[in-house]
Image: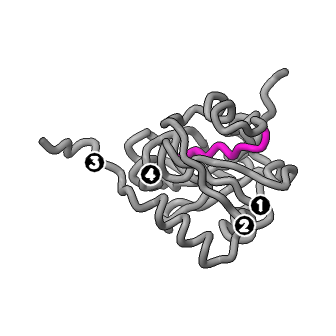
């Protein structure tokens, strides 16, 4: 039985990501773990510091009533996305989370497994500069049961995100 309204995300995002990192000479390692997409829980499972994780969320940015553009917003795991900062930096009318179906279609994988890389020209990568505060970063890698640890300098070099202050630290 097929589910036309919710197509199964392509299983190859993980493979494409590993191939890209390998081709670009990144220093990285893949780990397998129980399926989990929530940052706080997966950090405990992987044994990484929360601020070392990269949270990746698809954001819908509106310019006028009919012009919607999509961005992959990447922030440290102990932060949340600052929509006002995105709106201001992009000189847009508004910014908010993209609808789940649209986000998953653009990213090619389910919410919670979205890596901080885009394989879709309609999805522009943004990253908060605070990501660079860690020598090594970690993120879910296109699957809920796979994560990648890699050097943050390799992430910036390969993903080539637009660096914009878009993170708000969570209150302690």
Q: Residue at x 70, y 34 (%)?
A: 80
In this view, the mark in front (2 or 3) = 2
Looking at marks 2 and 3 on the same chain, the residue that comes earlier in the sequence is marked by 3
Q: Secondary structure at mark 4?
A: loop
Spatial CA distance of label 1 from label 2 is 6 Å
Q: Position of residue 7 (x, y in %)?
A: 27, 48
Which residue was labeled with disc 3?
A: 7
Tell me if label 4 and label 1 are in contact, CB under 8 Å: no
Spatial CA distance of label 3 from label 1 is 33 Å
- Indicate yes or no whether the magenta region holds residue 58: yes
Looking at marks 3 and 1 on the same chain, the residue that comes earlier in the sequence is marked by 3
Looking at marks 4 and 2 on the same chain, the residue that comes earlier in the sequence is marked by 2
With respect to residue 139, does 44 lie above or below?
A: above
Dot 3 surroundings within 10 Å: few (below 14), some, or many (20 or more)? few
Looking at marks 1 and 2 on the same chain, the residue that comes earlier in the sequence is marked by 2
Which residue was labeled with disc 2?
A: 27
Q: Which residues are magenta?
A: 51-61
Q: Residue at x 74, y 39 (%)?
A: 48
Q: Secondary structure at mark 2?
A: loop
Dot 1 surroundings within 10 Å: few (below 14), some, or many (20 or more)? some
Q: Position of residue 86 (x, y in %)?
A: 69, 47
Which residue was labeled with disc 1?
A: 151
Spatial CA distance of label 4 from label 2 is 42 Å
């Amino acid at each position: 039985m097929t589910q036309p309204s919710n197509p199964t995300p392509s299983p190859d995002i993980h493979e494409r990501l590993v191939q890209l990192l390998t081709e670009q000479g990144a220093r990285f390692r893949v780990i397998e773990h129980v399926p989990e997409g929530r940052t706080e829980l997966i950090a405990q499972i992987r044994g990484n510091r929360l601020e070392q994780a990269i949270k990746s969320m698809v954001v819908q940015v509106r310019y006028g009533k009919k012009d919607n553009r999509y961005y992959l917003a990447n922030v440290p795991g102990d932060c949340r996305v600052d929509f006002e900062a995105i709106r201001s930096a992009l000189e847009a009318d508004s910014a908010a989370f993209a609808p789940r179906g649209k986000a998953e279609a653009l990213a090619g994988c389910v919410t919670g497994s979205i890596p901080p890389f885009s394989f879709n020209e309609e999805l522009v990568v943004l990253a908060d500069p605070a990501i660079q505060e860690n020598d090594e970063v970690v993120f879910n890698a296109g699957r809920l049961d796979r994560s990648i640890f890699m050097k943050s300098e390799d992430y910036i070099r390969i993903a080539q995100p637009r660096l914009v202050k878009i993170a708000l630290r969570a209150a302690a």
